[in-house]
Image (cartoon, helix red, strand yellow):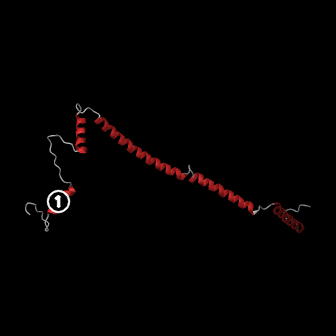
Amino acid sequence: MTDTGPFKSDASAGSDASRASDASRAFAGGRRRRPRKRTRLRWIVLAVIAVVFAYVFIGGDYGWYNMLKLREQRSQLKAELNEWESRERVLTGELELLEGDAETDDRTRFELERRAREEHGMVREDELIYRFPAESDSAEADTAAMDSTGVKTSDSAR
């Protein structure tokens, strides 16, 4: 075989073509195709792995959704704790006020008397209690006292 340069003879061109077709057949024949079962098995395994990761990161005990619910619950519990702490401060203040000596402390005496009057309806011996009807009761009485023309009449005039 002699090198003829960039131009090849027709005989050598045919032999190159036959060599190329032989190489492509050898390459195609040497490459083994994988069976479809193996490819399908890989997809199934990948799908199972994806489902497991999705459960772990989204739906599990330490998943994204559960963490959001736990954060919301924590904020609600903090708000409730703040309410209880403020209630405790109020009750502690009231307790300290009521535990004081009523004979020497005017504020303690005033608070004890106020509570006795409001909660238990107690009065001193020389006091009179004036009770007025509630706003809704007085409005009903005013309506009943009006005649058909809408003019308010007194009971003594009737």
Q: Is residue 31 left or right of residue 42?
A: right
Identified at 50% across, 51% down, the residue is 68
Identified at 43% across, 45% down, the residue is 78
Image location (x, y in percent) of residue 25 = 84, 64
Q: Which residue is mark 1?
A: 141
Identity of the amino acid at label 1? Ala
Q: Is residue 77 left or right of residue 143?
A: right
Q: How many marks?
A: 1
Q: Is residue 109 left or right of residue 90?
A: left
**Which one is nearer the viewer's eye here, 80 or 53?**
80
Image location (x, y in percent) of residue 73 = 47, 49
Res 37 quadrant in image: bottom right
Image location (x, y in percent) of residue 156 = 8, 60
**Residue at far top of view:** 104
**Residue at far right of view:** 1
**99 over 56 or under it: above or below:** above
Q: Residues within 10 Å of mark 1 (few under 14, many from 20)?
A: few
Q: Is residue 99 left or right of residue 66?
A: left
Quarter of the figure that contains the C terminus: bottom left
Identified at 25% across, 35% down, the residue is 108
Quarter of the figure that contains the N terminus: bottom right
**Which one is nearer the viewer's eye here, 104 or 126?**
126
Res 14 quadrant in image: bottom right
Secondary structure under tag 1 reads helix
Image location (x, y in percent) of residue 126 = 14, 40
**Which one is nearer the viewer's eye here, 57 or 93?**
93
